[in-house]
Image (spheres, grey):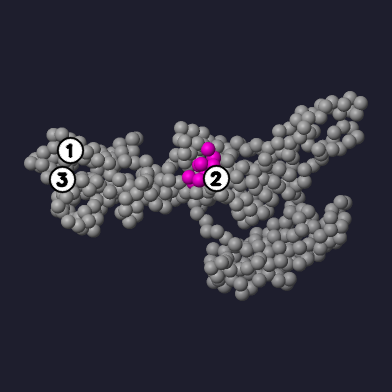
């Protein structure tokens, strides 16, 4: 059935009714006046207009899986308390949505839901940075060097090695592995076939040595799969024309003796780099509702430790380079907030071709408190003002809904110019969470409207 969440924040103009359903929200029924019950938390007030979502179908004409209705509040200025503006939500206001107001595409209706408006939350902090388990969306493939096939053998004779979808060679990790085919100088085709397969898990290398022959496609495949370390990480199969009895011709020639298998793409075409890819997501959860996020600033804090680990790699030793490698060169501030503002979670989806480019569990994410910054104020004994040092401006990673509270400058003057105010309550507070892997975070979520 559709899931309903009702959000109300003091001094905002509307409640938000957020409806979600994985099957899609049907357009056959929409929220109307009779579906709502409003109770004022303070003073006289009534429910105002209902603003529906712009559409309940996406660009492809399919039902959306998430939608938001806005419900206004009508009250006179001051009715919600001294200084409270007209037509705003007041802490304690309550909005209820009756059952059956919305349905999904399977005609399942929502259960009743209610939400009570809360006061604005000051200096929302990032309390956790959660990382999904990896989703290995593409696996690395190699092709055994064709030099080992007789030149006079017709057809498409190839042997492909493919990383399995789990283990330490899956996804992006597979691109760091090498496949080496070695023929020692003592090789003799006249002796019994002997193929030695070794897997160096630390050096990420598979070495196949043709000690003696004659050898065939079948004997090579058998030797590969007989090695438990190889079989746990890789599969091997032939091209369309190669069969088990197809002969191989190991050579002691210098240009063939230590041949490295080349990368190929999913179709078996030669590739310049491994095609292994790993997808993952990171969600930052805040202590309170946020109104805006500076997605670039927050992501820079998340990736700071990863950048430091890649300082010897010129292609990944800056945040901008690393973001490009992770497929997130551009981040939308509004779309990064899950469900849009007001929200408590910021989400990033990334894809890596190297595990070195991925954040790691236990990475420290050092997030400074946002502040407008200000110049110093000199002491003024006659006015009773103490000296206040300058405050360096810090771009906030997020802003909340609370106003920046004024601070007393001296016994008679209240001021909020910034120099005497060490905390900007409307901006994020400081925090130092560590990245934690969590099953509650999915590596991929389809975009919602």
In terms of depth relative to the viewer, which is nearer, 362 or 405?
405
Quarter of the image with the C terminus in it: bottom right
Residues marked 1 and 2 touching at CB (< 8 Å): no
Q: In this view, does 261 lie above or below 33?
A: above
CA separation in Å, label 3 and label 1:
11 Å
Mark 1 or 2, nearer chain start: 2
Write the residue at 23% across / 58% down.
Answer: 240
Residue 322 is inside the magenta segment: yes
Q: Where is residue 133 in the image (x, y as percent from the top left)?
A: 47, 47
Mark 2 or 3, nearer chain start: 2
Instruction: Bin the neighbour count of mark 1 within 10 Å (Cα to Cα): few under 14, some 14-19, many 20 and up.
Output: few
Q: In which quarter of the image is residue 387?
A: top right
Residues marked 2 and 3 touching at CB (< 8 Å): no
Instruction: Bin the neighbour count of mark 3 within 10 Å (Cα to Cα): few under 14, some 14-19, many 20 and up.
Output: some
Of circles 1 and 2, the one toward us is 1
CA separation in Å, label 1 and label 2:
53 Å
Q: Quadrant of residue 73?
A: bottom right
Q: List the residue tagged with mark 2.
A: 130
One can see residue 289 in this view:
no
Q: Position of residue 323 (x, y in %)?
A: 52, 44
208 sits to left or right of 288: left
Write the residue at 60% across / 49% down.
Answer: 346
215 sits to left or right of 108: left
């Amino acid at each position: 059935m559709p899931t309903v969440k009702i959000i109300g924040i003091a001094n905002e103009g509307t409640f938000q009714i957020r409806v979600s359903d994985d099957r899609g929200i049907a357009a056959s029924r929409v929220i109307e006046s009779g579906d709502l019950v409003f109770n004022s938390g303070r003073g006289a007030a009534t429910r105002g207009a209902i603003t529906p979502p712009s559409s309940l179908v996406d660009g492809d004409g399919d039902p959306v899986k998430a939608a938001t209705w806005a419900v206004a509040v009508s009250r006179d200025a001051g009715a919600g308390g001294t200084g409270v503006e007209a037509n705003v939500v007041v802490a304690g206001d309550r909005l209820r949505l009756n059952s059956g107001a919305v349905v999904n595409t399977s005609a399942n209706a929502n259960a009743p839901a209610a939400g009570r408006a809360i006061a604005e939350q000051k200096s929302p902090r990032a309390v956790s940075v959660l990382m999904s388990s990896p989703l290995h969306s593409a696996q690395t493939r190699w092709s055994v060097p064709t030099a080992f096939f007789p030149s006079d053998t017709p057809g498409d004779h190839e042997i492909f090695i493919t990383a399995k979808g789990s283990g330490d060679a899956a996804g992006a990790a597979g691109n760091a592995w090498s496949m080496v085919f070695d023929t020692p100088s003592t090789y003799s085709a006249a002796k019994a076939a002997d193929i030695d397969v070794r897997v160096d898990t630390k050096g990420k290398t598979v070495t196949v040595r043709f000690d003696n022959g004659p050898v065939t496609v079948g004997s090579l495949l058998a030797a590969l799969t007989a090695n438990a370390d190889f079989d746990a990480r890789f599969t091997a199969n032939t091209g369309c024309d190669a069969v088990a009895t197809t002969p191989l011709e190991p050579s002691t020639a210098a240009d063939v003796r230590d041949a490295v298998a080349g990368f190929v793409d999913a179709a078996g075409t030669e590739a310049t780099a491994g095609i292994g890819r790993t997808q993952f997501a990171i969600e930052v959860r805040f202590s309170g509702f946020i109104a805006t996020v500076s997605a670039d600033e927050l992501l820079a804090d998340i990736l700071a430790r990863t950048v430091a680990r890649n300082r010897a790699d010129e292609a990944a030793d800056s945040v901008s380079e690393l973001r490009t490698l992770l497929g997130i060169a551009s981040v939308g501030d509004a779309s990064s907030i899950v469900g849009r503002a007001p929200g408590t979670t910021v989400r990033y989806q990334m894809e890596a071709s190297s595990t070195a480019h991925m954040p790691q569990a236990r990475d420290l994410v050092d997030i400074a408190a946002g502040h407008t910054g200000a110049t110093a104020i000199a002491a003024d004994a006659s006015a009773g003002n103490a000296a206040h040092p300058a405050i360096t401006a810090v771009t906030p990673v997020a802003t909340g809904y609370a106003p920046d509270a004024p601070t007393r400058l001296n016994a008679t003057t209240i001021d909020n110019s910034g120099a005497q105010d060490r905390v900007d309550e409307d901006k994020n507070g400081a925090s130092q969470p560590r990245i934690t892997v969590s099953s509650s975070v999915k590596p991929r979520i389809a975009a919602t409207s």
